[in-house]
Amino acid sequence: MDKCSADVMDNDNIMNTDKNTDKNTDKNTDKNTDKNNHGNNKMEKLWPQVRKLLVFQIKLYIDAFRDLLLSALSLGAFLIDLLQRNEGPDSYFERVLKFGRHTEHAINLFNQFDAGQHDEHSVDSLLNEVEDKIRKNVKGRRE
């Protein structure tokens, strides 16, 4: 084989290698896209459960803070009522209890209250609003 034939064969081998590399790159890209789509589908299926857990945890923290606050408020209200001899539905202690019932509905820790009963000041509506803003922000970044 002469030098020119060897050079032509080397160029053919290089070109075939480049074509194979391009095909492999395309296959790898397709595989990565498939993996990403599979990951997105998996996350879409998993998200409702993850969201429930996150919402419950947030509500637990809010409820715990509320309990500590109500504990202090109830002691103070009781002492004031005792000193001022307040009784009945207008006493400070009864007002604390009313506030506690209201916050119980607003937090709705165990989803025991109907979703239709929520006002715009409920934890659920606040968390839905935050989630919507995050989704819009993420969607805006993707575009």
Image: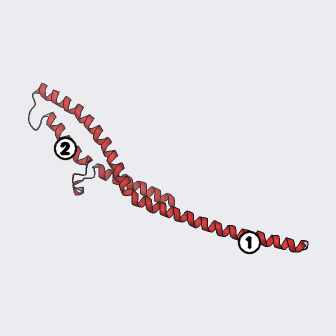
**x, y percent for residue 29:** 59, 65
Q: Amino acid at mark 2?
A: Arg
Name the side, left or right, on which 22 lies relative to 94.
right
Q: Judge the density around disc 1: few (<14), some (14-19), many (≥20) Cα neighbours within 10 Å.
A: few
Local SS, label 1: helix
Local SS, label 2: helix
Q: Nearer the viewer, residue 76 or 42?
A: 42
Residue 20, picture quadrant: bottom right
**x, y percent for residue 35:** 52, 62
Residue 41, picture quadrant: bottom left
Considering only order in the chain, which callout, 1 or 2, is on the residue closer to the N terminus? 1
- To which residue does mark 1 refer? 16
Q: Judge the density around disc 2: few (<14), some (14-19), many (≥20) Cα neighbours within 10 Å.
A: few
- To which residue does mark 2 refer? 101
What's the mark number on residue 4?
none
Q: Which residue is located at x 39 percent, y 57 percent?
A: 47
In the displayed structure, 64 sits above or below 40; it is above
Name the side, left or right, on which 7 lies relative to 111.
right
Q: Nearer the viewer, residue 4 or 43?
A: 4
